[in-house]
Amino acid sequence: MRIRGSVALVGSVALLASGALAGVAAAAGSASAEEGFAFHPAADSTIKPEESSFLAPQPTLASPDAEGTFVYALSRRALTGGEWTAGGVPAGMKATLYSGDPCKARAGVAGVYTCSAKGLRYVPAPALAATAGAVHGTKLYYGVAYVPPGGSVAAGIAEAQAAGARPQDGTHTAATVTVKTPARVAENKLSLSVPGVAAGASAAQSVTVHAVDKARLKLSFASSAGQRVWEYGERNLEVADVVAGPSARCLPADVSPGLVCDILAPGDVTIGYTLKAGASMKAWKVDAKAEYQVWTSPISTGNPAVKAAFKVASPYPVWDRHRLFGREKDGALTLLEGTGRASEPFASYAATAGREWGAYGLVTKLAPLTGRGTGGGIVARDKAGVLWHYAPKNDLFPLDGRTKVGAGWQIYDELAGVSDVTGDGRADLLARDKGGVLWLYAGTGKASAPFAVRTRIGAGWKVFNELTGLGDVTGDRKADLLARDAAGALWLYAGTGAAAKPFAPRVQTDLDGAGLRSLSGTGDLTDDGRADLVTQDTAGVLWLHEGTGDPSAPFGAQSRVDRWWDQSRIGSFDVLL
């Protein structure tokens, strides 16, 4: 009886697959997933003209790699069984197979594709896209069935063709792809009401959507432009007490804080919520963004969206993170990212920011460099006396390509970037000539000509073997300078903010510079708003000197920085930036 039943089933499946028999084949095992493979149900998707859609189902988390065959049935009508007379994509869509593709069009069965997954680490599928001329409302119906190794592909074809009439059980699924034009999607409108909130308090906010289409509304929060991005633990906001009404179904977003709401019917829908700020939240400026995801492809752009900013009232300021660069003896430039924590001032990794830096005899940064890619950049003089400028770029790529400042800089034996000592907000450069005269090159803010004509500060600077710009270590918002003499004494030249006389008379600090290889005024490394100093001794060990903001004692106790990197790499630095 079993054999006869199996033979009868296969015959019926073959007829259904060819379109000659109505009804749904209740196949007993074409996609029984004996190997354990399973996928999530597919979701209906919406795309714009000239955009692609992904038909491949997403495997479940515990699923092993598939080794069988995926069957895709594409149709212009719902996949409810019956004769296969609408197979294929509708006008305005195209399905594409590429050379070497594991997917093949099934001969004699329009719109059916079989895709072998053997040896692959992904789920194969035909490529589907809407054409430029696709009209609004064009819809494709598709079904997917998985046939494990040894299963009946013919039975899998039948099951895919009728996937809309059977349960979505981990090896079968059905969904649609619909084209919606930009003009239609733009009719969906959004607005936000986002009053500010105080740390430790809450505020009532809301988002309103004028929905022409049913779609998913996503509400998210992020730090506004001009600030660093939130770090782990700084997303100290909570969305609570959501009031959505019957036309919306809302859940917390995967990435908190945020909200995801399915708008179930066209109309005007307002979703109210309470935004709570933690007591320790800093004084962030926050962007609230609402996006109405009518187009659902991961590559879609242009969905209706609105952004509004609000402030968190807090006594705790938001300070930038700062970077430290070190040039290794082989010429590689290493980047260490600041954390804002005095106990662990740098992240546990070191990145290479370039390898050509051995070509330069003198190198200095113009101002502390932030993790956002701001600051004055770096200037470097090559062996021919040409000065080059590397502007800061962004958080991912710290420095832009070099630009030529000019020739003739071989007359100087010391360069020091000193942030802004002229009070105009632009980073400035000091240059000492071989006679000991110190010159000021005021910054212009122009990439093509970053410095103005030099002005003389004064003679007698030959007594120093290192000049280091500090930023503001005296707490007066004016950039300062540290100078080391031949005996190792470190002298503080407090900035005045006046270009004609940029520094006050020197004051000796209590730091001993005799055993130091290099020094760097890094900016704030400890999240207290005060500029800090990093030094490296002759053994290659880094030391953090926390800024105090007190001009009489600008640096606190030193602490060793040595816990995580390849010490031989860090120890090979010949200059800190």
Image (cartoon, grey):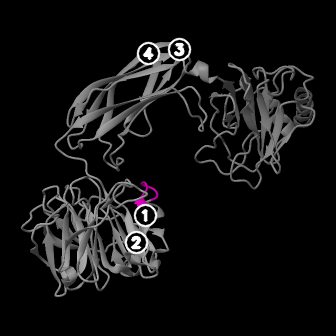
Which residue has dot 3 on it?
Answer: 265
N-term-proximal mark, 4 vs 1: 4
- The answer to whether the residues at label 4 and label 3 have Cβ atoms under 8 Å apart is no
Q: Of 286 and 522, which appears nearest the observer?
A: 522
The type of residue carrying mark 3 is Ala
Q: Secondary structure at mark 1?
A: strand
Residue 566 visible, this angle:
no
Which residue has dot 2 on it?
Answer: 380
N-term-proximal mark, 3 vs 2: 3
Horizontal and vertical percent position of residue 227: 32, 46
Residue 384 visible, this angle:
yes
Label 4: how many residues lie within 10 Å, few (<14), some (14-19) or many (20+)?
many
- The answer to whether the residues at label 1 and label 2 have Cβ atoms under 8 Å apart is yes
What is the C-alpha distance between the residues marked 4 and 2? 58 Å
Give the extent of the magenta segment.
391-397
Q: Nearer the viewer, mark 4 or mark 2?
A: 2
The type of residue carrying mark 1 is Tyr
Label 3: how many residues lie within 10 Å, few (<14), some (14-19) or many (20+)?
some
What is the C-alpha distance between the residues marked 1 and 2? 8 Å
Residue at the image point whose x is 19% and y is 87% from the top: 486
Which residue has dot 1 on it?
Answer: 390
Horizontal and vertical percent position of residue 12: 90, 28
Residue 32 vs 426, above or below: the answer is above
Which image quadrant for residue 197?
top left
**Labelled disc at residue 269:** 4
Residue 325 vs 216, above or below: the answer is below
Q: Of 323 and 420, which appears nearest the observer?
A: 420
Residue at the image point whose x is 23% and y is 41% from the top: 283
206 left or right of 484 in image: right
- The answer to whether the residues at label 4 and label 2 have Cβ atoms under 8 Å apart is no
N-term-proximal mark, 4 vs 2: 4
Q: Nearer the viewer, mark 3 or mark 2?
A: 2
